[in-house]
Amino acid sequence: KKSERAGGPWGSSRPTARAKDHLKHKDSFYATGETINWWLVFGVVLLLTGWSRFYKVSEPDHVCWDETHFGKMGSWYINRTFFFDVHPPLGKMLIALSGYLTGYDGQFPFEKPGDKYENVNYVGMRMFCTFLGACIVPFGFIIVWELTRSLKAATFSSMFILCDVGILTLTQYILLDPILLFFVTGSVMGMVKVHSCRNRAFSSSWWFWLIFTGVMLACAISVKFVGLFVVILVGIHTVADLWDVLGDLSKPVRYTVKHFIARAVCLIILPAFLYVMFFYIHLLVLSKRYGFYSSAFQSQLEGNSLYNASMPREVAYGAAITLKNHRTGGGYLHSHWHLYPEGVGARQQQVTTYTHKDDNNLFLIKKYNSESSEDDEVEIVKNGDLVRLEHVTTRRNIHSHKEMAPISKKHYQVTGYGENGTGDANDVWKVVIVAGKDNEVVTTVSSKLKFIHYLQHCVLTSSGKQLPKWAYEQQEVSCNSNMRDKNALWNVEDNIFPKLPNVSFTVYAPSFLERFLESHAVMFQGNAGLKPKEGEVTSRPWQWPINYRGQFFSGNSYRIYLLGNPIIWWGNLLFLAAFFLIFAYNSIREQRGYGDHPSIKERKQLMSNGCGWLFVGWALHYVPFWAMGRVLYFHHYFPALLFSSMLTDPVLRYIIEPIPQILPEKIANTMYHWLIGVIFSATVYSFYLFSPLAYGMSGPSSTDPNSTMYGLRWMESWEF
């Protein structure tokens, strides 16, 4: 009792120097032991990841699924041929670079899935994508460790990513998805690392992770635009961090301003600079012809008819011209000998837009009331003139009348009409220069033109809608009574007229900024207009979390099928719901002022902070797809899946950790370890069962009772 009154077993209110040394040594021993355990577990995770990811990476030895697109684009980079894609360029550039460095020459056509890789060095590109995809497992481990400081939670969360056959399948091929997932998880890892260094702000490690996060964000959005979701996540987290810094009354406001400037530079200015730089490299490397962009853009591409071209600056009557629709990705005004079929307006000559150079794109521009001859004086076309457009090949005029257009039923039909350039009053069009002055001269490329029908008072337009096979799936041209139609703008691209002097096309050369902005306009429009191909399997967001239907990667005798591990996916769904209910319950208790034991408060803080950010990450990468009108596929869910897989184990531990407080210690320990053992065994065994989906299946289909996969077809919608 005297000892207790004196301050404890050491006989004083403070420990002696010897006791302090003993405690320090003991803490150091445990810290060292924990560090060794951490690295041992992390090392095992790395070994299992490497083995599972690189096993059979060269199989199958044929083109699988979207390798036909991204392998082909890698070839175009190596050959420096310009192309159009709906995604930003970084992912394709990295694929091309990996192929180039490993000996791929860019000559394989990647025409269709199933094509054999014969004498093609494709393995280097596959291994590069697989390596980046493999990195998401240790990244997930580190993220959960930093959020929870629980080695068990980090281990199980990384195991859920490791044992998911869907993630394994998606990250083993020449695709953008493993590259995107690498940068998304890298961004989140950088975010939580910066937060962990908050007590060492402005130290070298803090700066390293802040810059690392900025680079990863730039790369994520430079691979696919859905990288914007992780940018938003990091942005919200940064605002929350700055709010906490501002609330620290021990620091002056100047300290908060320094934090704000550091984050603005590293997380806004640096990513923006890198994003623009990637596009600069993209436009610098790709220098050969492509016809999808504007006339001025194409003038910078080698092999294009506009490259180093020269032609008259002004447009004169009697010139042979091509008209390119000014709409992003628009084609050339086009006609051919074929007529509209019976029941589609008047049975006259078809007029369409065509996205490729062709002799059938040429038209003579003539006065509405007379023929131009070689002896006439040169007369320039001006704003407000009435003209006829005569198709050079068929000698029929662009014509419109009060018949419905083939697809846009509120528009009038546009046809080719007349014989040898002679038609009727419905061939007359008024040339209008957008924002032009009276009698302003029409110029090549630079004048934005509208052609307004003189009698019907409608404007010549291209709806962008694809016509059926009777029109060779070219795009519809019609006459719209809505004069504000944004697709009714045209420009003269080719201008053939020997009587006027030619000028170099370099006068139309756009700046880098103009090409950068046009590239984005084309990508946004392409993304919005994506439609499923005939026979293509698409999906809706409600199907993704429940693992409703997979996706074939290889349909030959060696079959690969993208499908999530159902044990992991359905478990993730269950614990997402559990997190939502627990969070709501805790919030209500806190709002009502219920007191909790300090240990319970600590667990709640973990739930709201660590798990809360993972839940926000899942929601940001999943919910926006419900509002998208474009075609969607199963693989779009995988970034969200990573967050739900990392969330599952922390929520599970929050639920089962109170067991020792409810049950006797011996029973509680038995139950706890039994639950952990069941979850671990079920996860690993389900990976073993479903791994043929990723590593390759042969033999009969799963619908055949003799198939080894017959018993694993748990849902009718699974088609493996």
Image (cartoon, helix red, strand yellow):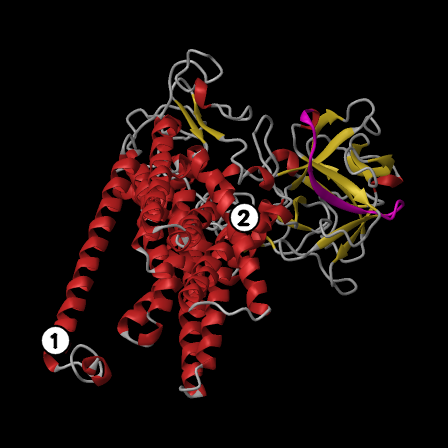
Instruction: Give the residue displayed 51% in from the left and 70% down from the top.
Output: 595
Instruction: Give the residue displayed 34% in from the left and 31% down from the top.
Output: 685
Q: Nearer the viewer, mark 2 or mark 1?
A: 1
- The residue most toward the top is 706
Marks 2/1 in contact by CB < 8 Å: the verdict is no
Q: Position of residue 598 (x, y in %)?
A: 41, 69
Q: CA distance from mark 2 to mark 1?
A: 48 Å
Instruction: Give the residue displayed 33% in from the left and 51% down from the top.
Output: 665
Q: Nearer the viewer, residue 120 or 9?
A: 9
State which tag comes first along the sequence, 2 or 1.
Answer: 1
Q: Amino acid at mark 1?
A: Asp
- Is residue 533 in sight in this rendering? yes
Q: Position of residue 26 (x, y in %)?
A: 15, 67
Q: Nearer the viewer, residue 466 or 362?
A: 466
**Which quadrant of the structure image shows residue 11?**
bottom left
Judge left or right: residue 408 versus residue 133.
Answer: right
- The label shown at residue 577 is 2
Bounds of the magenta segment? 454-469
Judge left or right: residue 333 versus residue 600.
Answer: right
Image position of 45 with respect to 441: above or below: above
Instruction: Give the residue displayed 65% in from the left and 27% down from the top.
Output: 472
Q: Nearer the viewer, residue 538 or 699?
A: 699
Q: Secondary structure at mark 1?
A: helix
Q: Position of residue 292 (x, y in %)?
A: 56, 44
**Which quadrant of the structure image shows residue 213?**
bottom left
Judge left or right: residue 348 versus residue 17.
Answer: right
Badge 2 crowding class, 10 Å Cα cut-off, few under 14, some 14 to 19, many 20 or more, is: few
- The label shown at residue 700 is none
Q: What residue is pinned by disc 1?
A: 21
Quarter of the picture containing the N terminus is bottom left
